Image: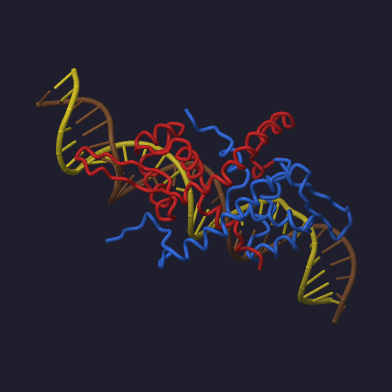
Chain colours: A blue, B red, C brown, D yellow
Amino acid sequence: MGGRVGISVTLEVVCGKWKGLILWKLLKDESMRFNALRRSLDGNISSRILARELKQLMNDGLVERIDHQTVPPHVEYRLSPYGRSTASFLHAMNQWGIKHQEELEAAQPYPDRAGDESTS
Amino acid sequence: MGGRVGISVTLEVVCGKWKGLILWKLLKDESMRFNALRRSLDGNISSRILARELKQLMNDGLVERIDHQTVPPHVEYRLSPYGRSTASFLHAMNQWGIKHQEELEAAQPYPDRAGDESTS
DNA sequence: GTTGAAACTAACCTTTTTGTAACTACTTGT
DNA sequence: ACAAGTAGTTACAAAAAGGTTAGTTTCAAC
């Protein structure tokens, strides 16, 4: 036994291709509309995925949804006060990521992240 | 444009079901043998997966493999000096995870992390 | 002399995650 | 009238991640 530590909880919340980026974006931009957020994320997250990610983040109490109840819909997403507490580790992760990228570029000519394919 | 930030790099390195736990374990235990590490991780990571995770972590320069070259094999894994720098965000993630778990338990009677299934 | 442990690897399979395309209702701009 | 934008949803498909079983080599214990 030694698995159920804080780390695993945090990873469940933040892991995946988009969650971290969404939180990071909302941490900087205060509040964003659905499609604006969508377009800001590298341009290629589908609405289906974004909707689901946001739903999960709301479920975890990190993101709030403000529906302005207008007829061409106007909905905004923002971090909850608690959601903003993720800044504690997101900043650290961001710092490290920047450093790590430099390390990798300096050390490895071939950024080979395969690790499973045949090398014969 | 706005995707390729430090966060995404860090998530690529640390994400998934096991990487974070492996780093966390090696951060505390200094050096571990393959099967000892395996058994310490909740008991149910397969050797195939552990081998692959370690390979990727080595590829990223975070973990070192020390092969004692004995005939019933004896191999140890440990964090590289650089690997130990992940402590900067792993500690923060761990802290937050512990807090978050308390928040969830206090707030939500049903820990429903589904978010995709039919609700009809 | 069969069993078990060491550190893996290969073939195969299942589950989870992510993505695509089309479509909803309603309104504004052309 | 017709296209486009708003915030999504549904059905379907692909890819990635994770897991199972068995097998390798050599020695030490029973």
> At 43% from the left edge and 63% from the top edge, which residue is drawn?
A107
Q: Is residue A108 above or below residue C9?
A: below
Q: Is residue B11 above or below residue D3?
A: above
Residue that protrudes farthest toward the front in the picture: B81
Q: Is residue B118 left or right of residue D30?
A: right
**Viewer-proximal residue among A48 and D19:** D19
**At which x and y percent is residue B76?**
33, 41
In the image, C22: left or right of A75? Answer: left
Q: Indicate left or right for D10 with B60 as reference.
A: right
Count of numbered labels shown in the rendering:
0
Q: Quadrant of the C terminus of chain A?
A: bottom left
Classify residue C26 by image quadrant.
bottom right
Of the pair A94 and C24, the residue shown nearer to us: A94
Q: Could you tell me residue A45's position as x and y percent?
A: 64, 61
Residue at 59 percent across and 36 percent down: it is A6
Q: Residue at x 56, y 43 (%)?
A: B90
Residue B119 to residue A76: above or below: above
Position in image of residue A88 (x %, y %)? 67, 46
Closer to us: A49 or B5: B5
> Percent position (x, y) of residue A61?
73, 41
Which residue: 32% across, 45% down?
A: B66
